[in-house]
Amino acid sequence: MESSIECVSSSDGVNEDEITHPHPYSRFSSSKQSNNLNGMVINPATSVHELLECPVCTNSMYPPIHQCHNGHTLCSTCKAMVHNRCPTCRQELGDIRCLVLEKVAESLEIPCKYRSLGCPEIFPYYSKLKHEAVCNFRPYNCPYAGSECSVAGDIQYLVAHLKDDHKVDMHTGSTFNHRYVKSNPRDVENATWMLTVFNCYGQYFCLHFEAFQLGTAPVYMAFLRFMGDEIEARNYSYSLEVGGNGRKLIWEGTPRSIRDSHIEVRDSHDGLIIQSNMALFFSGGDKKELKLRVTGRIWKEQTNPDGGACIPNLRS
């Protein structure tokens, strides 16, 4: 079944992972009723999380940790926003570091914040953020390219979100035959067509078709992204074909993970790129309207039990 998909203009933007901070689980224990750390009176029942929580942004504090003369602490990010005034007592902050609290932070080992999503790792306090930025269990950003979307979640959640909120085309099967049209083919300022999502081999794939300026020349580009991690994406391959008037272009490659934004994939030219003049030649007619038919298929690579190399599985 062929699809005629209208062009939607969009503004490019990269959605970065929002890193929220952890809730440590260990607590202080002491035989005394209270301790004093650089002027801070700490009850033994106070949790480590409460000690390291910035009173302004409520995120966990990482060095440098600042404090005022009365012992109130805050993170370095918020210190730059409070005009050198303690948000608790309104006294001048100065440049006092809370070295004792920084030492406390150094001694902690904390579970990854994506533990509830399946990550079993435990890290020193300072190493945890670096891990969480690349954790395989972290949520995925919405792959929709038609507009900036801040939604993140697991794959099943994003599939439902794409279907219900973005109204994308959903297809079952590993082959496709799409027709892309545009009435003003030379106006390619960051133009995107409706995303198409394919469900095959128990996985989901996103087919993108975009137009943009490559140097001074307008080009069209089609590429596939895998809804999962990069390592999993390497198990699959895809081909794209476009043609007309007895000519055709063919692209074969590995789908990129949706961990890479559509802008990253586009700017790396990792897909089928069609020069504007060639696209109009394929469209036929008077070359005043874009009418491109893009066909393709997705297949799963199989490991050769003898040599270990991958061989294509051509079954749908």
Image: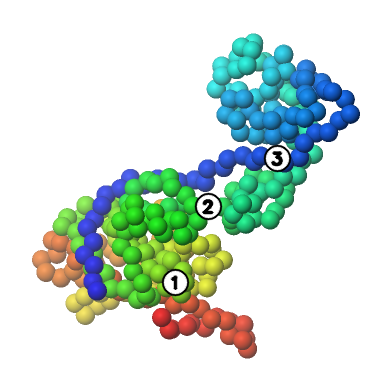
Real-space CA distance between mark 3 and mark 2, rounded to the nearest whole angstrom: 21 Å
**Residue beneath label 1, please?**
253
Task: Choose the circle earlier in sequence order: 3 or 2.
Answer: 3
Q: How crowded is mark 1: few (under 14 residues within 10 Å), some or many (20 or more)?
A: some
- Write the residue at 40% across / 57% down: 160
Residue mark closest to the camera, 3 vs 2: 3
Q: Residue 24 carries which label?
A: 3
Q: Can residue 213 be seen in this view?
A: no
Residue mark closest to the camera, 2 vs 1: 2
Q: Is mark 2 on a helix, strand or loop?
A: loop
Amino acid of disc 2: Pro
Percent across and percent down for residue 291 are 19, 66
Quarter of the picture containing the C terminus is bottom left
* Image vertical order of residue 235 relative to residue 114, above or below: below
Q: Residues within 10 Å of mark 2 (few under 14, many from 20)?
A: some
**Residue beneath label 2, please?**
139
Q: Left or right: where does residue 55 sit relative to residue 161?
A: right
* Image vertical order of residue 187 relative to residue 27, above or below: below
Amino acid of disc 1: Gly
Marks 1 and 3 in Cβ contact (< 8 Å)? no
* Image vertical order of residue 63 relative to residue 96, above or below: below
- Write the residue at 83% across / 33% down: 29
Quarter of the picture containing the N terminus is bottom left
